[in-house]
Image (spheres, grey):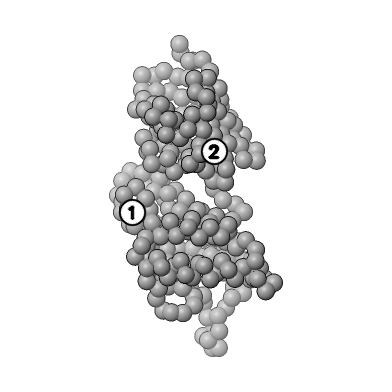
Amino acid sequence: MGTTIELIDREEQIKTVLEERISSIHDKNLQGVLDLYAPDVVSFDIGEPLQNNGIGTIKTRLENWFASYQSPINQEMSNLVVSVGEEVAFCFCLGRTYGTSIKGEKFDMWYRVTTGFRKFGDKWLITHDHVSEPIDLKTGKGLFDLKPQDESNGIKTENRISLSDKARMCYHAYESKDRKAIEDLLSIDFTFTSPNDNRIDKVTYLERCWPFSEENPVYEFEKMLEEGNEVLVIYKCTTKNQKTIKNTERIIFEGQKIKSIEVYFGNSINA
């Protein structure tokens, strides 16, 4: 099953997939949503039919759904529980969708969601979605006005993973030597600037800076300030040869991706 740290990392990866789905649905980003699903995904939705097979049916349903809303589609998840192994994971929660249709009608409903995942290489993809609504057993009608009693442990459109947490994930990728994690965090047009580098691109940054992960760095954050789309970080970093350095970094985000990093070197503490 892996160490406790490995399990926590996998849980965070699953939560990141869920957060990316909420974000892409909010923006009506069709391809962004489809990229999170396996080609052979099977889904059980509230509406007909009983079963949907394959990514093609997901695409068609999303296109019709997005076209029916005039406003962003807001979603959130409450009472989220994630269980994860090495190759397979699942989660269950209470989901909410709300927004305004093209006819001006406002929708706001809670429902039940179970989602299954399988790991393909280094990437978790959704292989099963099950959405259901409780019904009144006397009338057979859906109970669309029910709300969760406990709305803890959730993810929602207006409360996504904080940028400070995203910044911490960047440093943790170096500590755990997880190159895939750092690549996923950086935007395609990412740039890196330091006293030795002038706005180098993502490929060059990884070539020059990623080898530092072999130094087994351990980061200790002295200050982390988040404002707008920026996070300012002051940290101490100790390497495997017990060399300790202190730097300040300005991390700028575009959405949930790191757009640029500016590093201001400090002196080696034990030089």
Residue bearing the label numbered 2: 259
Point out residue 251 in the picture as x, y percentages from the top left corner: 56, 34
Q: Are marks 1 and 2 in contact (CB under 8 Å)?
A: no
Where is residue 103 shown, x and y percent of the image? 67, 74
**Identity of the residue drawn at 49% across and 20% down:** 196
Q: At 55% across and 22% down in the image, what residue appears?
A: 264
Asked which secondary structure carries label 1, the reply is strand
Q: Which mark is residue 34?
A: none
Q: Is residue 106 above or below residue 240?
A: below
The picture quadrant where one finds residue 175 is top left
Residue nearest the viewer, comparing 114 with 228? 228
At horizontal 32% and vertical 53% (from top left) the residue drawn is 120
State the SS at label 2. strand
Q: Distance between the Cα atoms at labels 1 and 2?
A: 27 Å
Left or right of 247, for residue 37 = left
Q: Amino acid at mark 1?
A: Lys
Q: Amino acid at mark 2?
A: Lys
Q: Is residue 135 visible?
A: yes
Q: The C terminus is located in which quarter?
A: top left
Image location (x, y in percent) of residue 147: 59, 69
Mark 1 and mark 2 lie on one chain; the one further toward the N terminus is: 1
Instruction: Pick whichever, 202 or 49, lies toward us.
Output: 202
Residue at 53% over, 86% down: 140
Extreme top residue here? 271
The vertical placement of 261 against 271, above or below, is below
- Mark nearest the camera among 1 and 2 is 2
Q: Which residue is mark 1?
A: 119
Q: Callout 1 environment at 10 Å: few (<14), some (14 to 19), or many (20+)?
A: some
Residue 57 rendering spot, x and y as whole percentages: 42, 70
